[in-house]
Image: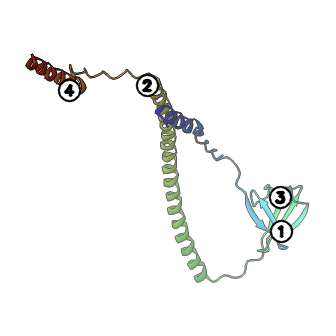
Amino acid sequence: MDIKEALIKIKQIFEAAPPVAPAAPVAPVDPNAAPTTDYILEDGTKVVIDKCEAGGTMTINGAPAPDGDHKLQDGTIIETAQGVITEITSPADPKVDDGVTTDMNSRFAAIDGKFTSYEQKFNDYETKFTAYESRFAAAEQTIVKQQSAIVQLLEVVEKLAATPAAEPAATPASVFTKEEAKEERFASILKAIEEIKK
């Protein structure tokens, strides 16, 4: 394989490489969108409620909940009309010991503190992720430029390989080759013999 064939094969490798697509933009989260929560009815059916209060909406399998009362697993009864919550009735609260309430409040406060800590960590990770995305996009642009430069360099080298090479300079021949030197010595010996015979 000569240089030109090797360059053609290398060039084909780069031409066959798929172009690097830019990173897809991340869809922003709509802060004004109403949050939804999944609840489970007493019979095990999953329902989605956007606000668990009068005026909120309730859907079952993506359709508005039928009119009437719907009892959740915790005993809460939700009355709906055309998928809109008209009334919520909580189950009768059992008598709660004050010591248990205080203990639960302290536990909730601890959980709330942990949640705040996790939320801060999540925000930090989101900031780092955004920075990584911008660095990755810059690296993609650099790779595309480098691929273009390599293809251009291969074209230059291919043109250089196609240029005919000049013939090497011939070494000057000696005045006498070995054969000529032998013949001349032999002729001079014969001449000397001829002169002796005279």
The residue beneath circle 1 is 45
Q: How many marks?
A: 4
Return the x and y of residue 92 as percentages of the image width and height.
77, 77
Q: Any mark on residue 59, and which?
A: 3
Q: Tell me what residue is drawn at x 50 percent, y 54 percent.
A: 125
Distance from the alpha carbon under mark 3 to that under mark 4? 116 Å
Sequence-wise, the earlier of marks 3 and 1 is 1
Amino acid, disc 1: Thr
Q: Is residue 60 above or below residue 42?
A: above
Please state which of the two labelled residues, at mark 2 or mark 1, is closer to the viewer. Answer: 2
Residue closest to the eye, 51 or 102: 51
SS of the residue under disc 1? loop
Mark 1 and mark 3 in contact (Cβ < 8 Å)?
no
Residue at image location 25% in from the left, 21% down from the top: 173
CA neighbours of label 1 inside 10 A, class few (<14), some (14 to 19), many (20+): few
Q: Which residue is mark 2?
A: 160
- For the point 16% across and 24% down, the residue is 185
Q: Quadrant of residue 40?
A: bottom right
Residue 182's tag is: 4
Q: Are marks 1 and 4 in contact (CB under 8 Å)?
A: no
Image location (x, y in percent) of residue 160:
43, 25
Return the x and y of residue 13 as percentages of the image width and height.
55, 39
Residue for point 51% across, 50% down: 129
Looking at the image, the residue that sits furthest to the front is 198
Label 4: element kind:
helix
N-term-proximal mark, 2 vs 4: 2
The kind of secondary structure element at disc 2 is helix
Where residue 184 sits: x, y (%)?
18, 21
Packing grade of label 2 (10 A; few <14, some 14-19, many >=20) is few
Q: CA distance from mark 3 to mark 2?
A: 73 Å
- Asked if the residues shown at circle 2 and circle 1 are in contact, with their CB atoms under 8 angstroms apart, the answer is no
